[in-house]
Amino acid sequence: MLGTPAFGTTFAITAISTYLPTLLGVESGPLVTGAVIAGEGAAGLLLPIVVGVLNDRRSRVVADRMRFVLLAVPLCLAGLLLVATDLDTVVIICGAAAYFVGHFAYLTPYEALYPDLVPDRVSGRSRTAASSWRFAGLGAALIGGGFLIDLWAPAVFLVAAAAVAAGTATLLRVLWSRRDMTLPGAGGSGAGALRAVGRVVRDREVSRILLATLLWNLALQGLKAFVVLFFTVGLGRSASFVSGVVFPLVALGLVAAIPLAGRAADRYGDRPVLAAASAVYGAGLLGAGLTHSWWMILLVPVPAAAAGTVMTVNYSALMRVLPDEHHGAASGLFLLSRGLGCLVGPLAVGVAVSLAAPAFPASQGYDAMWFVIGPAVLAAVPLLLWPSRRRSAS
C-alpha cells in the first residue's frame, strides 16, 4: 500500500505533459508549449536537494516526514485545478508551474519513506509494487485521458487531482499506526545543506547508482521523445502502427517483467539484475539502429522487459547503500539525477538526429537516436560491477 500514491502522481504528471498542449492551443506556438513542459525538468533540478536536506534535518519520526508530503498536496491540487479551469494561457501556465513545484516537493519526502520503512530483504519487491502502481497510472492517463479529453478537456485534470488526493489519503491511513516510529538517523547530522549533500555524493556506491540512474533516464526520455517520429517520419509507418503494434509489444514486456524484477533483485541482488538488464536493454536499442527487419518488431518485448526491470529496481539498489541519516538528501539526489536525464536525453537525441541526417538518409537521420541512447544504457553496466555493501540494519 506504500506504493499507492505513485498511481496519482504518475497520472497527474502524464496528464500535464501529454494533454496540457491541447489547452494551450495552436496560438501559443511550439516555443511556449515546449518551455512550459520543460518546467518539469527545471523543477526537478532545483527542488529535490533543498526539500530533501530540509526534510532530513526536520524529521525525527514518520509523522514528520508525512508533514512534508502534506504540505505539497495543496500545491499539487491547486495547480491541477487551475489547469482544469481552462480560463486563459496565463492561468494554465501558472497552474502547470504550481503542479511541477508541488510534484517534486511531494515525491522527495515520499521516496525517502521507502528506505525509512522497508527492510533490505524486501526492498526489491517494494519497488515492484511502486512500479506496478506507476505503470497503471501511466496507462490510465494515456488511454483513459484521451477519452476524457474528447468528452470534456478539463476532466482529465480533475481526475488527476482526485487520484493524487486518494493516493495521499491511502498513504496516511497506512502509516497512521506508525506515525510515532523513529526514523533511522533521526534528525540528521545537523550539517549544512551543501555538506549533507556532499557527504551522500562522496559515497562511491551511492554516486555510481546516481550516475547510472542519470544514464537510464537520459535513454528513456530520449526514447520517449523521438520513438514515434522514428517510426512515422524515419520509417514512413503510420501512427496507428505505432499505437496498435509497437506500444502493445512494449506493454507486454513491461507487464511480464515488473512483477518479477523486484523478487529477482531480492534473491540475486540488485547489482547483478541491473547489470544484466542494462546489457539486454542497451543491446536491443543498438540493434534497432542496425537493422529495420520485420523480426526486430517481434523482439521488442525483450528490451522492453529489460527496461522495465531497470526502472523498477534502480531505487532499490540505492536504498540498500544509503547512509541512515540522509534518506531525504539521497531521495532528492535520485530525483535530481532523473531530472538531469529528462533534460539531457531529448536534447542529445535531437542534436544527433539533426546532425546525422546525411549519414542515415534512409531514416532521415532518426537512426542516430539509437546510437545515443543505446551506449548510454550500456555505459551503466560497468558502474554496477563493483562489489556492493548493504546499508546497515536499523
Image: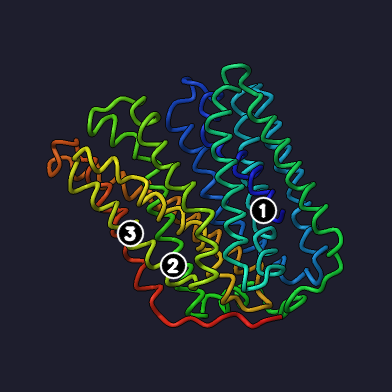
- Disc 1 marks a residue whose amino acid type is Gly
Q: Quadrant of residue 140?
A: top right
x and y, in percent, of residue 217 in the image: 44, 55
Number of residues whose C-alpha sits closer than 10 Å to that of mark 1, classed few (under 14), some (14–19) or many (20 or more):
many
> Residue at coordinates 63% horizontally, 76% vertically from top-left?
196
x and y, in percent, of residue 349 in the image: 31, 47
Residue 273 - label:
2
x and y, in percent, of residue 379 in the image: 32, 66
Number of residues whose C-alpha sits closer than 10 Å to that of mark 2, classed few (under 14), some (14–19) or many (20 or more):
many
Residue 259 - label:
none
Above/below status of 31 relative to 121:
above
- In whole angstroms, how far apart are the C-alphas of marks 1 and 2? 22 Å
Question: Can you name the residue that lies furthest to the top here?
Answer: 151
- Disc 2 marks a residue whose amino acid type is Val
x and y, in percent, of residue 21 in the image: 51, 28
Q: Which residue is mark 3?
A: 280
- Disc 3 marks a residue whose amino acid type is Val
